[in-house]
Image (cartoon, helix red, strand yellow):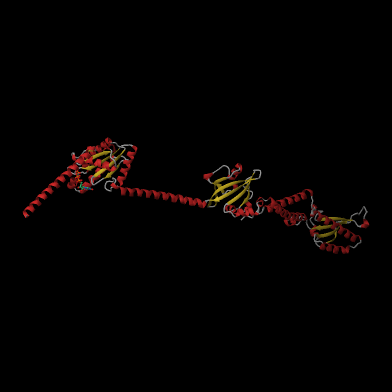
Amino acid sequence: MPLRFSPSVRVTIGLMSLAMTLLLFMDLVLGVFPSQEKMQLQARQHLAESMSVQLATMLSQDDQRNIPAVVNELVKRNPDLRSIGVRMSSGELIASSANHLSSWTTHDSTEVGRSRFIVPMAPAARIGSPKDSRWGQIEFAFKPLDDSTLGSIFNTPSFKLIGLFGISAGVMYYIYLRRTFQHLDPSSAVPERVQMAFDALSEAVLVVDNQSRIVMANDTFVRLSREHREVLIGKDPSSFRWLTQSQSDEHDTPPWQECMNGKSAVHGNAYEALHDEDLRRLIVNCSPVLDARDAVRGCMVSFSDVTEIEEANQQLVVLMTELAHSKEQLQDQNVALQKLASSDPMTGALNRRAFFPLLEGMFNNARATHTPMSFVMCDIDKFKSINDVFGHPVGDKVIQKFSSIILRSVRDTDEVCRYGGEEFCIALGNTDVDQAMQFAERVRQTVETEVGFSLQLEGRPFITASFGVSSISHNAPSAAALIEQADQALYVSKNSGRNQCTIFAPEMAKQEEAEEKSADDATEERRAALKTRFQQEKDKLEKSGA
Ligand SMILES: Nc1nc2c(ncn2[C@@H]2O[C@H](COP(=O)(O)OP(=O)(O)OP(=O)(O)O)[C@@H](O)[C@H]2O)c(=O)[nH]1
């Protein structure tokens, strides 16, 4: 995990570096700090001169015997000093420390005044003598000065001084900045209680300033971002690579900017937060933060995680689709069931129970709307003999063929019913009596030409049907009366030789009544005759008995 510093530490390091750079620059240009080398050279110079005075004094006092001992003692006591040699002007080395010859042999003129010092000698007694004004010289060999290792640099007083200054300044900067940043740090501008309240929210919440920089991020947003809170503060939410607008809902302007531009809330923008494989779907809502003068100070942005809800919605859509599909299947099955319950399984025509309510509805509607309506009753001629000659299975086929001819001849608005064994009836909506007659005649002809032929039997049987037609124009008071009228017309067709169509006429009703009456009268006559005969027989028996 990368090391993160607080803003106070970061600014402190910056200021410290700046101050130390400034000091180094001043030292370089103005020489503020004393040079250690210079001081060291001055010290060597003084040492060489004071020793020279001491040795010259000894020479002038002809105390030459003690000089080697003094020289060795001086070298021993000064660790910086390597050797001392006392050389006469003739070049003769009259006294020296133990190692002087080896350390003085190479003559490097650049080292004179640095690691080599030569102090001329002139005994006090002879000072001022022009001929022999110089006895010789005292040679001092010091350790080399050019010790420029890193350790020696760190060891210089100027470096130590700058370092000390830098550290103490840094400590002071840090203490000062921490106090100052408590007021200037945008994140600490949000009162602690407010921050705590935001942290308690399950929604991710940001507060941005009017430059779209984050000044507050609650705990949920910090978790969502997978960043440190300090890293988030001061950034524009649009700069986060992990936070993007949903492709389905892309806008040029981020919603918080749009909210601040319009000074009004912006709701429902779709965003996505993607970390590795983890994709969260978010809905962004923004509310502007206005000051007392109605100027925009910032914006409060909330991110609602709707990932689970969307997944549940998708599952719901799938379930709803399946449910709708099941409903459709159920409806189809219901229709099929209803059809089974309302139709005759052998022919597909309606059964009586389903047909009568429909007929009543059509009848009432026609009467109410003053539109025509007709009814046809039809029956296969001599059907009993078909059964007798060809057998019942062939009879069934004849019924099926007869019904299929009727069903394919009607319109969707018409209703066909298997009224009895080989008897069918048809309710024709919006059809007057002439049109109904044309319809019946058309079906009759088709039956005549197709049914017998369809049986594919030898000696092609001639199969026909008879038709009776009624219409509400004949003032039937009810649907049942309409059926009765068609039945009377059918009766006429049957009695008139079959294979024909007959329209109901009011006389048919009278004729039937008359027939019924004559039938009743005949019965009454027979009953009276029988009664008379019975009485006669009875009288006969009484007489013979008497
Ligand atoms: N094969 C078969 N026969 C049936 C069916 N339903 C009724 N029948 C027979 O149809 C015959 C009807 O005959 P009837 O109504 O007496 O009269 P018909 O022979 O058609 O003569 P008309 O109607 O006077 O021309 C009866 O013999 C019934 O047994 C059925 O579903 N299949």
Q: Position of residue 501 (x, y in %)?
A: 22, 38
Q: Which quadrant of the structure image shows residue 253?
A: top right
Q: Position of residue 519 (x, y in %)?
A: 17, 44
Which residue is located at x 44 percent, y 50 percent? 320
- Residue 450 visible? The answer is no
Q: Is residue 31 left or right of residue 216?
A: right
Could you tell me which quadrant the N terminus lies in? bottom right
Q: Is residue 500 left or right of residue 282?
A: left
Of residues 218 and 391, the one nearer the viewer is 391
Q: Position of residue 409 (x, y in %)?
A: 28, 39
Q: Is residue 276 above or below residue 365?
A: below
Could you tell me which quadrant the C terminus lies in? bottom left
- Residue 485 visible? The answer is yes
Of residues 486 and 205, the one nearer the viewer is 486
Of residues 27 and 394, the one nearer the viewer is 394
**Residue furthest out toward the top:** 434
Q: Position of residue 246 (x, y in %)?
A: 53, 46
Q: Is residue 410 above or below residue 113?
A: above
